Image (cartoon, rainbow, N blue to C red):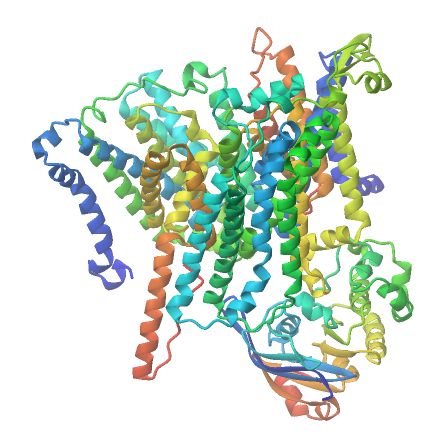
Amino acid sequence: MNAQTTGRFAWKSHIGFIVTVVGLAALPFIMAVMEGLPVGSLLANDSSTAKFLQGLLVEVFILAVFAISYDLVLGVTGLLSFGHGMFFAFGSYLTGVLLKTFGWPLWAVLVGAVVAGLFNALLFAVVLPRVKGITFALVTLGIASVFDILIRTQELNPYTGSDVGLQGIPRPDFLNPVDDRLRFYYVTLAFAILVYLIYKRFVDSPTGRVCVATRENENRALTIGFNTFYFKLAALMVAGITASLAGMFNTLYKPLVSPEIAGLGFTVEGLLMLLIGGIGTLSGAMIGAAILRLMEYYLSRWFGESSAFILGAIYVLIVMFLPYGIVGTWRLRRLDIAAGRQRLLSMFTGRQRETPDEGKL
Amino acid sequence: MPNLLQTYRKNRTLIITLVILFLLLLLAIQGMSTRDWVVTVLRGLAVGSITFLVAAGLSIILGLMDVLNLAHGTLFMIGAYVGWSMYVRPDTVVDATTPFLLVLAGFLLMPLWMPLLGRLRLGRSATRVWPWIALLAGLALLALALTRYPLSIWSGTEYQNSPIVWNQYFEAGTVQENVTPATFDTIIAAVVDWGSLLAGSVLVGLAVAGFAIARRGPTAQAARSVARPLMWFALVAAVAIGLYVVNTPLSDFLLSLSSNALFVLALIVAALVGAGLGGLMESTMIRPLYDRGIYQILLTLGLGFIGVEMVRSIWGRTGFTMPKPALFSSTGDGCPAESISGWLQHQCSTIIVDIGGEPARIRTYNELFVIAVGIVVLIAVWLLLQRTRLGMIIRAGVQDSRMVEALGINVRRVFTLVFALGVGLAAFGGVIAAPATGLSDTMGATLLLSSLIALAIGGLTSFPGAAAGAVIVGLTQQFIIRYGQLGINLPFLAEPWKPSPPLVPASVILLMIIILLVLPQGLFGRSE
Amino acid sequence: MSNILEVRNIHTYISQFHILEGVDVEVPKGGIVALLGRNGAGKTTTLKTIMGLTPPRSGEIIFDQEPVQGRPSYEIASLGIGFVPENRGIFRDLSVLENLKIAERKKGDLDRKSDFIFELFPDLQRLIKLPGTHLSGGQQQMLAVARALVPDNRLLLIDEPSEGLAPVIIEAMMEAIRRLSSETTVLLVEQNFIVASQLAQHYVIIEEGRSVQAGLMADLVHDKATIQRYLGAA
């Protein structure tokens, strides 16, 4: 299944990934051509539907990174965190404040976002050795609520803008989504792909394997001799940094920060992305983010205010009837097909093979 | 000395609770007059008692069936809104009961379908396809019939007909004059609508049975009894149509009732609606997920959000108040009263008592009544847990529900019952809270957060823990609010710091995190 | 038919693990049958499967002429089967009295049986108000067996009654089981062969999830080879 096992690069097993990347890279041009616009006007950054769709996709990439970082914490490591939205919101606010109030250059903001991500992960990790399961969920929910309350207080109004949020954030010259949206598009696309590849590598690494083992059975992982705390901390740190960077891009793109991203609602939106794609599958998180963002856009266009109700209903239906999400269910199907082929082969060769276990992903 | 240590170990949680409470109170009394202190304690207890009404069900449900019901706050809110409707617009509730009962009647026929459909022999693809068609047709029929059903209702969007305006009518005593009864134009229209409601719910019921057969294959079970579902169906349908017939006189009667009587009715109706919703939720949605860990939490979270959207679409996005019952609202002569008997005589909204040489204003509803209700419920639930067979089964099931089942007790039914009771209690709490705090679409989320904190402080599944946690949360909140008004002297600030009101919940969360760092199991939790 | 319980070729899975791969047990009415076998052979799972706590994927369980496999465990218990699990299943937050009372299926069950129960376990009467947490291992075991006697059970499934108990208490326990077996049939899981051989009239040996041998206990006691092979040292 893996490229390393054959020694050569296995094109076949990566074909989906490569097609997706190439397709997304070419998409702005395809859209321009479909609209009958000359490619030159695309590069000249004329406003058009193509530009609007690019913007929508930029949001998708940013949310996909947020979703995959949540998947690392919740799906891969099995930490029931209800405060993941704070990682994203913290990055967003920090970027906004640093650019607007302090006028930092972009590279410094980037460093700031990384440090903020680490700080957040450590904040969650303080309680990690002591509480588990539901209590951990409550503590993370609590910490995130404190953050939500803090940014809305009058005391911090000059920095965070309380209930209004941050507006009029200056755009840095290099990454300006208005002047050069195509560049912004490619930067966020590259960011999303990079994060995906790093995460893939992380989950396949020995550290990532211990994270999975921690999710499956923490006591067993402890008996084998792993201090699971460090692995959980590692997962939280990686997720914290990426979510914080996603938040930074979010501020750069919009360029405003609304306090809504700090609420529980945003974390739930992240959960919905994971559920649509399949918890613990990484690629599912990103696909889920894309589906959710596009669905939200069209639902609110068609149904207006009641779109939230419809989204809620979809969420409940997925939990009840499609618990493994799109990618998870697809992988299960593939296992079924593989098992069927094994049975067929064994009928001809007369040899019994173990069928792959269905319950695991 | 070792003796002392032993006593400490045995009563560890009690001692720590007392120490924390003592420190809290000690801290609190500094820079605060005795009057302020007493009033703040009363307010804290009142907040604590409302938190407790939600936290109690939450903790018993979590203990017994390992489900953290994150929809509990929303159900509390739905209780408040349903209670308000019964209180201010009882005629609307009467109107809405008829279609609701008709749909219910259709579903009551469900036990008949499985054996009946089991005899039906269809092709493979037909077996799979027809339930979908039945489901869609049934839902479409229901949607159509429900939207066309004449309801005399307020409006969530239009100010002239909004709950706020109806509140004004209520306080002026002119609700009855402003109500325009809604009826079908012709009896034929009524029969058609009722027929489609019944047909819709029957079709949905058939579809559900069809799905079960498509998945498991027909089960060869005989109908246990044909007569019983039919009897229930006839009874419920007859009550529904009977209600429509007597709609106008019944509505007039309800509208002519005193606000005290209506308030009691509102409490009962809200608790019943809550219990019904809870039972329905458990038996249809949560039950299939018992062995799927976190999916229950995700499900209840989603249901909570749907509930909020539903409330917004029916009652509007703007918050409004709920007028207090007459017993707690008078400001006329003899008021403010100076004693309990004076209040009861004049039905005052406030009592003024002399504490430490200063007059203290105590609101009869917000403080006295709410605390009294909290205490009564605390005792009632405690008696239920300690003195009844159901309570015994709950306490045993919290530890090991499979062993309880192996003794021959139908634990699943107990689960449904307990879920219904817990949610009913939360909905009841919603009505109690509404006149004191008003109604808004965020009241559920706020209260869910404080009752989760209360639970975490108290030890998640412990009932006394939930009560203690709720009181701690309430007291902390109110003391911080009071301090915010007085100002806190900080060593590095020249002027007293006055935190803005939103910082109050933050302080309670910090308290929770500190307690959990010291005692990860909470105050009353047991380390497993 | 004189068998009160017949287990025919049951297969049980716990998540993906195939634990029971064909177990047959026949329990004649009256007396005691012992399930023997090494640790992890599947004895406890057999009891749990009969109770419906780990339902079998295939095979038949017939209790008193009635197939019970696949039914919820409260229904199986209500037919008249009492279960004393390995961990004793005493409810910590309930007093001894409540632990007995919760097992009532009809009102007054406990009142009718209390004389018999307290005659078997006189200690319990003294402890009646104590919460379950404060009981010693032996007292818990007595309470667990007593609890199974409260309703009118026709069959008791008792898992490892002698495990972790002091020799004196084992003696008392054995005496109690012998006496109660005059009233109801008992299916016993027992590691301690000496205990089992003194109590039971019949035996079934389970090895790696299969029942491999069954017969009269009187014959097995002399069959050193079989004891050596399936049960280790005798």
Most foreground residue, B322 or A268? B322
Most foreground residue, A117 or A284? A284
> Where residue A354 sits: x, y (%)?
40, 74
Give the residue drawn at x 72%, y 25%.
B259
| Quadrant hosting residue C9 | bottom right
Give the residue drawn at x 70%, y 68%.
C86
Which quadrant is the N terminus of chain B positioned in? top right
Answer with left or right where residue A184 lies relative to residue B406: left
Tell me if I can see residue B523 in this picture.
no
- The vertical placement of B249 against A289, above or below, is above
Tell me if I can see residue A276 in this picture.
yes
> Where residue B212 sits: x, y (%)?
50, 63
Answer with left or right where residue A152 lies relative to residue A91: right
> Where residue B308 sits: x, y (%)?
51, 35
Most foreground residue, B129 or C74? B129
Give the residue drawn at x 36%, y 67%.
A336
> Where residue B227 sits: x, y (%)?
66, 64
Total residue callouts: 0
Give the residue drawn at x 47%, y 25%.
B157
| Quadrant hosting residue B467 | top right
| Quadrant hosting residue C99 | bottom right
